């Protein structure tokens, strides 16, 4: 993307699109936001920049009409969002052909196929880690004290096992209790996974957020925010470890405030697995 070229931001659900837009504009980027009816609020996407979910050809035409070449895709695009109130899923021929190729329950697979289609249509997909580098977690403590050696070893061992085993590519989060994996994120998401661990987690447990084994850095980076901390507080979990340089931190100050008030430690570990 050239310095004078507008960036098209395709917004999904959740808090990430709004914060990403604010950071990008603060950095001086010319950003134009696009979305889908019923998935994004009018405060993010103007009505004239919305299309119906599944109308890929209409989306491509809209992007071209505004001179958009480079795209950044952020926010939630779980396939079940088609059932959200206000969302109208109206697939055109392009979308129907695409859906026939994938498991409709697989959000990662869905977005990969959409990305491939957009590239075929001549659009350049920007990497989230590059465009939103100011939102990434770094190595070290985000709030609270540093990890213990036992916590370090547990995270590194579990992550290596999951990435090399039959469960890879796995969801972007898992929970360790006494050094063993007791839960892995599924399509319900991180917060649901954490809440499902009630009664099985405590001060010796670690919630881990990391990229998948074959993570596409243009799409769906792991993210944490105040909601993650709220879910941990509900079940009594007190440690959150996130992969540095590939995990987005949403509303960082509010996350820190909530974590500190709940006694939750949050720290980033190096992408190579060297926690420090």
Image (cartoon, helix red, strand yellow):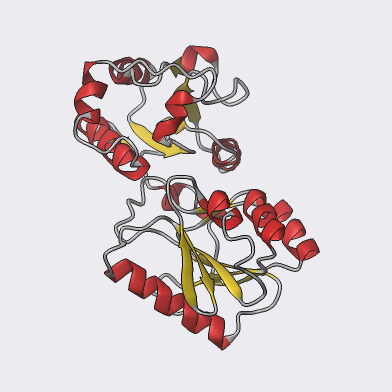
The answer to whether residue 180 is left or right of residue 106 is right
Depth check, front residue: 99 or 30: 99
- Residue shown at 49%/66% (left/top)? 244
Q: Position of residue 151 (x, y in %)?
A: 55, 80
**Residue 57 occupies which quadrant of the picture?**
top left
The answer to whether residue 70 is left or right of residue 134 is left
Depth check, front residue: 194 or 157: 194
The answer to whether residue 58 is left or right of residue 18 is left
Q: Answer whether residue 8 is visible to the viewer in this image.
A: no
- Residue shown at 38%/47% (left/top)? 127
Q: Position of residue 142 (x, y in %)?
A: 64, 67
Q: Is residue 150 above or below residue 242?
A: below
Q: Position of residue 154 (x, y in %)?
A: 48, 80
Q: Is residue 67 above or below residue 196?
A: above
Count of numbered circles on the image: 0
Depth check, front residue: 256 or 78: 78
Quadrant assignment for the N terminus: top left
| Residue found at the very far top of the displayed protein | 48
The answer to whether residue 173 is left or right of residue 234 is left
Q: Position of residue 198 (x, y in %)?
A: 63, 60
Q: Is residue 140 above or below residue 227?
A: below
| Residue found at the very far right of the displayed protein | 261
Q: Answer whether residue 157 is visible to the viewer in this image.
A: yes
- Residue shown at 47%/76% (left/top)? 180
| Residue found at the very far bottom of the displayed protein | 149
**Residue 3 occupies which quadrant of the picture?**
top left
């Amino acid at each position: 993307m050239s310095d004078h070229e507008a960036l098209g931001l395709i917004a999904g659900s959740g808090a990430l699109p709004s914060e990403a837009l604010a950071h990008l504009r603060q950095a001086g980027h010319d950003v134009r936001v696009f979305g889908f009816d019923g998935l994004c609020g009018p405060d993010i996407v103007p009505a004239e920049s919305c299309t119906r979910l599944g109308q890929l050809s209409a989306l491509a035409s809209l992007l071209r009409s505004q001179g958009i070449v480079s795209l950044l895709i952020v926010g939630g695009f779980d396939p079940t969002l088609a059932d959200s109130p206000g969302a109208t899923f109206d697939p055109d021929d392009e979308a129907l052909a695409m859906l026939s190729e994938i498991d409709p329950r697989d959000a990662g697979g869905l977005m990969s196929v959409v990305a491939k289609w957009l590239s075929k249509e001549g659009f350049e997909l920007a990497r989230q880690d590059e465009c939103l580098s100011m939102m990434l977690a770094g190595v070290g403590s985000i709030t609270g004290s540093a990890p213990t050696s036992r916590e370090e070893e547990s995270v590194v061992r579990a992550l290596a096992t999951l990435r090399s085993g039959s469960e890879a590519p796995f969801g972007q989060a898992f929970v360790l209790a006494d050094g063993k994996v007791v839960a892995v994120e599924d399509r319900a998401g991180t917060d649901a996974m954490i809440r499902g661990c009630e009664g099985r987690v405590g001060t010796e447990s670690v919630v881990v957020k990391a990229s998948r084994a074959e993570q596409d850095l243009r799409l769906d980076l792991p993210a944490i925010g105040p909601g993650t901390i709220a879910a941990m507080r509900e079940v009594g979990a007190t440690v959150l470890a996130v992969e540095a340089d590939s995990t987005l931190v949403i509303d960082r100050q509010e996350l820190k405030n909530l974590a500190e008030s709940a006694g939750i430690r949050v720290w980033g570990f190096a992408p190579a697995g060297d926690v420090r």
